[in-house]
């Protein structure tokens, strides 16, 4: 089937343009922020421990996570996919508006942000990482839909009835792999994590929800790499591997280890509720 007539720019006023891809990031961050705040309010999901962060702390955390996503995603694209930019045109590295973001780089950036925020605020890093991972499928879903609208990161040639002829993908019909990823990495992964947090109550176990996210994402990504067209500028790797597969394998191993570790760690009988942070004497309350 022909590619739908999508305009990657939602609207433009002079040189100022709003792109669907940028809106995907905004939507993913905003929905993820509110979902993490919702999880922190549901004390029964964390019992017998208190939720690891307060509402104001979650509000501060979203700034750290946004920086982690943008900086990590861009640097990940450069180091993993286009390292030649470092010595050929380093001025292009900060030019995120020209495209080029890596999920694995963004994940590393978010993890660094969670570690730094947790240490600064004396929060249990693993439990905060659980909440952040539970909210990540929002961003994955909108990001993959935006990839489809942009007509990028298409799949391999195929003759399935729903194959799409992408504008920049040549004359061959291809898998709409972006939509496969939106369905698995976004919808299916969110439902798995929803079962983990609300059904199995696994937020009581430190790191298990994060481990499930990492393992399931890695499995989905490695499977979908078989129908996704590899980047033409990358070398051919042995055994039919792709860069996405090789970056996902360590995620799978770490995720499996986090699940194993968390399921072995005993749950405390009871822990006093965490009191919300209050301003020190003489210090004005933070405006909301």
Image: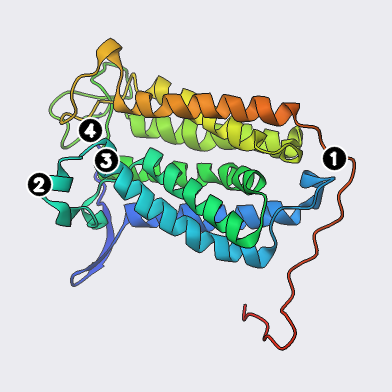
What residue does disc 2 label?
88
Quarter location, residue 240: top left
Disc nearer the start of the sequence (3/1): 3
Q: Earlier in the sequence, mark 3 or mark 4?
A: 4
Observer able to see residue 4: no
Q: Is disc 2 in contact with disc 4, using a CB cutoff of under 8 Å? A: no
For mark 4, does the 10 Å Cα neighbourhood hold few (<14), some (14 to 19), or many (20 or more) residues?
few
Direction bottom: furthest residue: 282
Q: Give the farthest residue toward the top.
A: 239
**What's the distance in space between the residues labelled 2 and 3, CA to CA?**
13 Å
| Residue at the image point whose x is 30% and y is 27% from the top | 243
What secondary structure is marked by label 4? Answer: loop
Quarter in which the C terminus is drawn = bottom right
Mark 1 = which residue?
A: 268
Separation of residues labelled 1 and 2 (CA atoms): 55 Å
**Going by the image, does 17 lie left or right of 85?**
right
Q: Earlier in the sequence, mark 1 or mark 2?
A: 2
Looking at this rendering, what residue extends furthest in the right direction? 269
Q: Nearer the viewer, residue 183 or 64?
A: 64
Q: Which residue is mark 4?
A: 2
Rendering coords of residue 86 (x, y %): 17, 47
Helix, strand or loop under label 1 = loop
Marks 3 and 1 sit apart, C-alpha to C-alpha, by 42 Å
Q: Nearer the viewer, mark 2 or mark 4?
A: 2
Q: Earlier in the sequence, mark 2 or mark 3?
A: 3
In the displayed structure, 20 sits above or below 259; it is below
Instruction: Report, in whole angstroms, how far the alpha carbon at label 2 lies from the one at label 4.
Output: 37 Å
Label 3, on which residue?
79
């Amino acid at each position: 089937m022909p590619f739908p007539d999508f305009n990657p720019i939602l609207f433009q006023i002079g040189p100022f343009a709003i792109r669907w891809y940028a809106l995907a990031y905004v939507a993913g961050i905003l929905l993820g922020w509110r979902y993490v705040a919702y999880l922190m309010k549901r004390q029964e999901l964390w019992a017998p421990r208190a939720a690891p962060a307060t509402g104001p702390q979650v509000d501060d955390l979203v700034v750290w996570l946004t920086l982690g996503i943008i900086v990590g995603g861009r640097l990940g694209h450069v180091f993993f996919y286009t390292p030649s930019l470092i010595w050929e045109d380093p001025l292009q590295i900060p030019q995120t508006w020209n495209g080029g973001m890596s999920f694995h780089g963004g994940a590393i950036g978010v993890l660094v942000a969670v570690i730094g925020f947790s240490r600064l605020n004396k929060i249990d890093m693993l439990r905060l990482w659980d909440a952040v991972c539970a909210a990540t499928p929002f961003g994955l879903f909108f990001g993959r839909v935006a990839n489809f609208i942009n007509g990028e990161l298409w799949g391999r040639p195929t003759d399935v009835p729903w194959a799409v002829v992408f504008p920049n993908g040549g004359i061959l019909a291809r898998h709409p792999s972006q939509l496969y990823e939106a369905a698995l990495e976004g919808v299916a992964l969110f439902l798995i994590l929803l079962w983990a947090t609300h059904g199995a109550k696994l937020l009581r176990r430190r790191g298990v929800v994060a481990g499930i996210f990492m393992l399931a994402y890695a499995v989905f990504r490695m499977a979908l790499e078989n129908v996704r067209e590899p980047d033409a500028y990358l070398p051919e790797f042995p055994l039919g591997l792709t860069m996405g597969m090789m970056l996902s394998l360590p995620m799978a191993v770490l995720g499996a280890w986090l699940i194993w570790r968390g399921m072995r760690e005993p749950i405390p009988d009871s822990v006093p509720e965490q009191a919300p942070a209050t301003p020190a004497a003489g210090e004005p309350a933070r405006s909301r």
